[in-house]
Image (spheres, grey):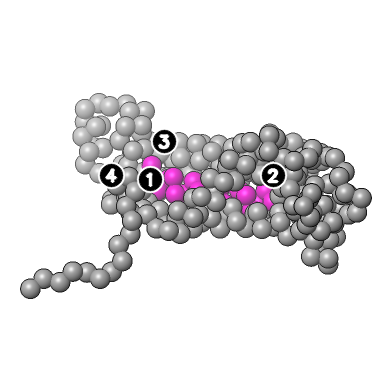
């Protein structure tokens, strides 16, 4: 006699088992990405226009998220803030993962003095508190968008390097790598054709996690006044600008904080609920 399992089955999509939480998280991330791309075309008012005679105005039919400390439309500023928060964070995490993963794979394959010197240098860089490093660099050089991207990328490159190197060292010790070396394959071929395809899935999951770290650090720098400067404003800068409205429970403070939380929590939930075939290279 056979019995059927009564456990709920996870719906399948494109051959992957997905969870409802992961789908909702992906929808939130996709929504903010679309907003970041098309913000200039969907904002109801120019971000610099004063459209309310009162400051920290309430939600109304004309101002869906109220007004800020100068009477500007908060909906427009939050939508445009998504462009800077998502754009700068995505550029920084892409740069740090590109550099860190590439250097990690090269160090794992070459080994020897190159691996030792590079690892010790990046360990020393990683020992500096990220927020302190960001504060010093931005205060000394300035807080333009390119400087912020490079600073954030440098801060998180050592972590991406250590993660990729640990994965690559395990792959580098396997038999098919030995066979490739015996055939006389070059280092570039071994890295690009043998190691990278076997670590790409956990690297992509790590990419999402580092994106969360970058968003939070960028928002922290902006809240301290060392992030984007006027007339630009990301979500952290919006919270700093309107912190005086907190006693009034103004949407100008609550909405940017909620935007930061919704993006970072959604990325974390998506990573936690990725199908095993994507998250684990051995699946």
The residue pinned by badge 1 equals: 201
Residue at 50%, 36% in the rendered image: 98
Q: Which of the two discs, 1 and 2, labels the residue nearer the N terminus? A: 2
**Is residue 181 among the parts visible in the rendering?**
yes
Mark in front: 1 vs 4: 1
Q: Which of the two discs, 3 and 4, labels the residue nearer the N terminus? A: 3
The residues colored magenta run: 200-219
> What's the CA distance linking mark 2 and mark 3?
41 Å
Q: Which mark is residue 79?
A: 2
Mark in front: 4 vs 2: 2
Q: Residue furthest front?
A: 61
**Res 122 quadrant in image:** top right
> What's the CA distance linking mark 4 and mark 2?
48 Å
Q: Nearer the viewer, residue 60 or 231?
A: 60
Residue 216 shown in magenta:
yes
Residue 56 shown in magenta:
no
Where in the figure is residue 189, as x and y percent of width and height? 33, 28
Q: Which mark is residue 173?
A: 4
> What's the CA distance linking mark 1 and mark 4?
19 Å
């Amino acid at each position: 006699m056979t019995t059927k399992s009564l456990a709920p089955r996870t719906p399948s999509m494109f051959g992957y088992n997905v969870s409802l939480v992961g789908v909702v998280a992906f929808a939130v991330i996709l929504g903010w990405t679309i907003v970041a791309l098309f913000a200039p075309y969907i904002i109801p008012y120019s971000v610099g226009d004063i459209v309310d005679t009162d400051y920290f105005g309430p939600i109304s039919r004309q101002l869906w998220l109220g007004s800020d400390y100068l009477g500007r439309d908060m909906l427009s500023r939050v939508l445009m803030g998504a462009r800077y928060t998502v754009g700068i964070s995505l550029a920084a995490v892409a740069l740090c993962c590109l550099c860190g993963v590439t250097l990690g794979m090269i160090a794992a394959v070459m080994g020897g003095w190159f691996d030792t010197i590079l690892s010790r240098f990046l360990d020393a860089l990683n020992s500096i508190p990220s927020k302190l490093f960001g504060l010093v660099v931005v205060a000394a050089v300035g807080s333009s968008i390119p400087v912020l991207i490079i600073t954030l990328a440098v801060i998180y490159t050592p972590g991406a390097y250590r993660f990729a190197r640990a994965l690559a060292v395990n792959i580098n010790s396997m038999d098919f790598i030995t066979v490739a070396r015996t055939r006389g394959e070059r280092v570039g071929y071994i890295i690009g054709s043998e190691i990278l395809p076997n670590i790409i899935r956990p690297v992509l999951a790590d990419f999402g996690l580092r994106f969360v770290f970058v968003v939070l650090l960028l928002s922290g720098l902006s809240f301290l006044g060392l992030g984007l400067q006027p007339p630009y404003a990301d979500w952290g800068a919006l919270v700093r600008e309107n912190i005086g409205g907190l006693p009034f429970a103004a949407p100008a403070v609550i909405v940017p904080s909620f935007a930061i939380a919704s993006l970072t929590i959604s990325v974390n939930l998506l990573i936690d609920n990725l199908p095993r075939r994507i998250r684990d290279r051995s699946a």
